[in-house]
Amino acid sequence: MISQIAAAQSNIEIAWGSTDIRYFHNEKPNDVSGSALELTAWRGERVNAQFVVWNEGETEQGAAFTLANLTDNRDNEISSENISAGYVETVVTDTFSGCGRHEVEKYGTYVVADMIDNKTSRIFAPDDTRGAWMTIQIPQEAKAGIYMGSVTVESKDGTTQVLKYSVKVLDRILPSPDQWNFHLDFWQNPYAIARVHNVDLWSEEHFEAMRPYMLMLASAGQKVITTTLIDKPWNGQTLDPFGSMVTWIKKADGEWEYDFSIFDMWVEFMMDCGITQEIACYSMIPWNLSFQYFDEASKTNKYIKSSPGKKLYNEHWGRMLEQFAAHLKDKDWFDITCIAMDERALDQMQKGIRLIHEKAPGLKISLAGNNHPEIEKDLYDYSVDEQDKNQFSESVIERRRAEGKKTTYYT
């Protein structure tokens, strides 16, 4: 239901939309409703809705929204602190998908509603439309019942409109995200957050900027902390390349030293955000097989290039694996850590696995890549391409589950 609470006529219109639709910024929305929205949730569940705001006038118009507490007829209340909303802003994209070279000139660009802003007010140009995504987190301690809520949209000219909705809270409890059984692994890129927020890498300001993102990730059920052991494990294919969280140092006397301080800070921070089940370390087998280290004698960064199975490779990684395993045991992280690889060939994987077993016995291994039955038993966390997901037999999946291993697929 929409109620008008001011005599002035506004060019701003509002309605409930669908969570299945991305509303175009320059089109009047279809499939919208002014009727009161009805939602249903368990205690502890998070539910979503989308309302739509658009300007039918010929001049720009400001609009801001506020969210009311949820209340039932027995004076029970769910605070608006458990409700968040933001306008869905547009981003520029194209039709490219998959891996490989992105040849921009081959694809026509367009804008799509995708980014949920955290601002509650904005200026609407003539014929401008925006969805606003609303998330309601029902506390586990909430009482079962039917709660009434509202969204108030106030235009710059003083006109106020209200969208009403209800949430039927059932007397069932959804466990907290850290208790969910499904294995979720979204890779994190702290380097991108430092650039976007214009803060120094690994500074106090950097960690403060990252916390809201990582808390949101933990609330989705994320299980894995993404870490890097080397510089550019994916050969810099992302806009913000991943650096190394471990500094490899060749001392002037030829001995090797490994500084794990950034790795430790990152892991401890992520655990404090609630992501604690697994640490994935990329990668012993990077895409370009080049390994940066700091040469103390020349005070410059240098590189070793070698492939799995080669003497130089085995020496370079063998030393590090022994010290890394000892460090993980000191931190009590050894049992949850995986040396992680991404889409590497079978022969390279087999040689890398042999070295891990030799130099760091018991250290877990993960792979996101093709289905390789020859190494399946060596992999604790095995995620195959979606096209290969049916190549795992039910008996293999059940055996792996009984062994406490993770078997997933990725897109």
Image: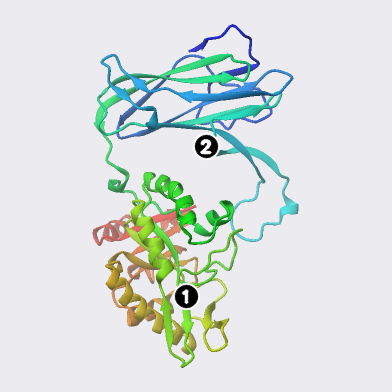
Q: Residue at x 34, y 70 (%)?
A: 378
The residue nearer to you, when weighing 41 against 258, is: 258
- Give the residue type that dot 2 points to: Asn
Secondary structure at badge 1 equals strand
Residue 241, percent across and down? 57, 63
Residues under labels 2 and 1: Cα distance? 36 Å
Mark closer to the chain start, 2 or 1 = 2
The residue nearer to you, when weighing 58 against 339, is: 58
- List the residue tagged with mark 2: 118
Question: Can residue 303 be seen by looking at this rendering?
Answer: yes
Residue 394, percent across and down? 32, 55
- Give the residue type that dot 1 points to: Thr
Compared to 177, does 300 lie above or below?
below
Residue 328, percent across and down? 32, 71
Q: Residue furthest front?
A: 204
Compared to 244, does 240 lie above or below?
above
Question: Can residue 188 be seen by looking at this rendering?
Answer: no
Instruction: Give the left or right position of residue 171, taking residue 204 as reference.
Output: left
Secondary structure at badge 2 equals loop
Residue 130, percent across and down? 60, 29
Q: Residue at x 35, y 60 (%)?
A: 268
- List the residue tagged with mark 1: 247
Compared to 377, does 275 lie above or below?
above
Dividing the picture into quadrants, the one containing residue 407 is: bottom left
